[in-house]
Image (tube, rainbow, N blue to C red):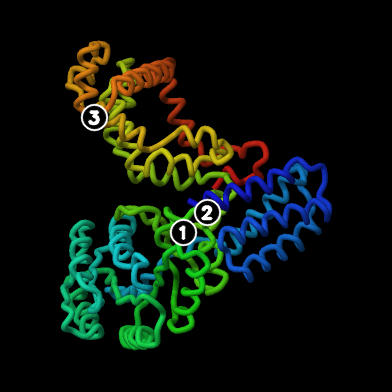
Amino acid sequence: MFESLSDRLSQSLKQITGKARLSEDNIAAALRDVRMALLEADVALPVVKDFIDQVKIKAIGLTVAAALNPGEAFIKLVHAELVQVMGEANAALNLSTTPPAVILMAGLQGAGKTTTVAKLARFLQEREKKKVAVVSADVYRPAAIAQLETLAGEVGAQFISSTNLEKPLDIVNRAIAEAKAQLADVLLVDTAGRLAVDDAMMNEIRALHAAVKPIETLFVVDAMMGQDAANTAKSFNDALPLTGVVLAKTDGDARGGAALSVRALTGKPIKFMGVGEKTDALEAFYPDRLASRILGMGDVLTLIEEAERKVDKDKAQRFAKKMQQGQKFDLEDFRDQLDQMANMGGISSMLDKMPGMSQLPAAQSQINDNQFKLMGVIIDSMTPKEKRFPDVINGSRKQRIAAGSGTQIADVNRLLKQHKQMQKVMKKVSRKGGMQKMMRGMQGMQGMQAPRGMPPGMGRR
């Protein structure tokens, strides 16, 4: 996510890191590069101009702390300004009202609104422990209602039925009454989208909003629209009293301009961003974390939160106990670790959040989630005995495993070699309290010191 912007900014700022002092000349050169990086990332021109002006004003009068060199201080300043542009802090949903709290979802057709409704329902149920009902007031798009019903069943939300023969206002009024009767905490309303902003669409949703008076009105925007995403959000904000924005499809946007433009142009906070196709791929939006990610500093706190939420704790404890007892790391264990990584979005998603990994493009290019999927398929083609005792896998067994997994013998050999390497690592870790030390180290990641070249505090959240 935001690879192009991250790469360009990292290269630009690397040139100023290590400078003995900041001068107008080297500041000007760095800011020219930053300006080009932001424009190429599709950030709106007024936002870029204001961003550069603010950084320049603050950089010229910058007093450098003793712990930093001038280049590091400049990067810290750019980070702080990125956070400022994107909204300073996470803006949580306001659910302080008599249940059900009505949340109206608005946006253009194709922006991912219906999918976002399902993602938000799952988010509220799993993380906020709310009872959520959903309803579709989209009476125009074929199969919109059926799509939401399917997604609601998938995430376990209460689906309130509707038909395309009803009026949107009648649907929502009835849904509020039903949600109240079912003791739902939150009612998510999926509204109709259009292919473009038009008067009829705006008039309808404006009337719906005025009648229903939702406590939250969220605009769902496709991040891949780039600068147009911010402009569309502004048009909706002019017509509706939006309370926040959801950036959808950020996993498909390598530029990231929408994230930097939407807040500045609308004045409304980005509350969530969609980071994948699955219903659990919705993250609360934290400007400071995203700024760190954009500058290649990682996002350790989000990584830890994902691990706490998505890693199977029982399996993890069994695995830790097994290693402590000195038992061998077998292919079943290897398969479990692959599953755990997949649950956290894959190795590429994890690396994206690890400090300094964006500075290692060679390592990134050699790691591919598809390679890990292939490993899983190969292991699944083995017998239980082969998984527990890999040493029994001889030439004929390799032929059978390769045929069963649709791979080559070379792929099976590569997997077995990688497993052997992992086995050696696990053996070292399990000796002399190594596992406990590793676990303590992971728990202490929130307080780790920033690597050289990273401003103090960037490694801490």
- Would you call the spot at circle 2 few (<14 residues within 10 Å), some (14-19), or many (20 or more)? many
Q: Report whether 459 appears left or right of 426.
A: right
Observer able to see residue 317:
no
Q: Which residue is mark 3?
A: 406
- The x and y percentages for residue 310 are 33, 44
Q: Which residue is mark 2?
A: 290
Q: Residue at x 49, y 70 (%)?
A: 228
Q: Which residue is mark 1?
A: 285
Observer able to see residue 5:
yes
- The x and y percentages for residue 365 are 49, 36
Q: Residue at x 69, y 43 (%)?
A: 14
How many numbered discs, if any? 3
Q: Determine the CA span between mark 1 and mark 2.
A: 8 Å
- Looking at numbered disc 2 in the image, what kind of residue is underneath it? Leu
- Would you call the spot at circle 1 few (<14 residues within 10 Å), some (14-19), or many (20 or more)? many
- The x and y percentages for residue 64 are 78, 49
Query: Helix, strand, or loop for circle 3?
Result: loop
- Looking at numbered disc 3 in the image, what kind of residue is underneath it? Gly
Q: Determine the CA span between mark 2 and mark 3.
A: 40 Å
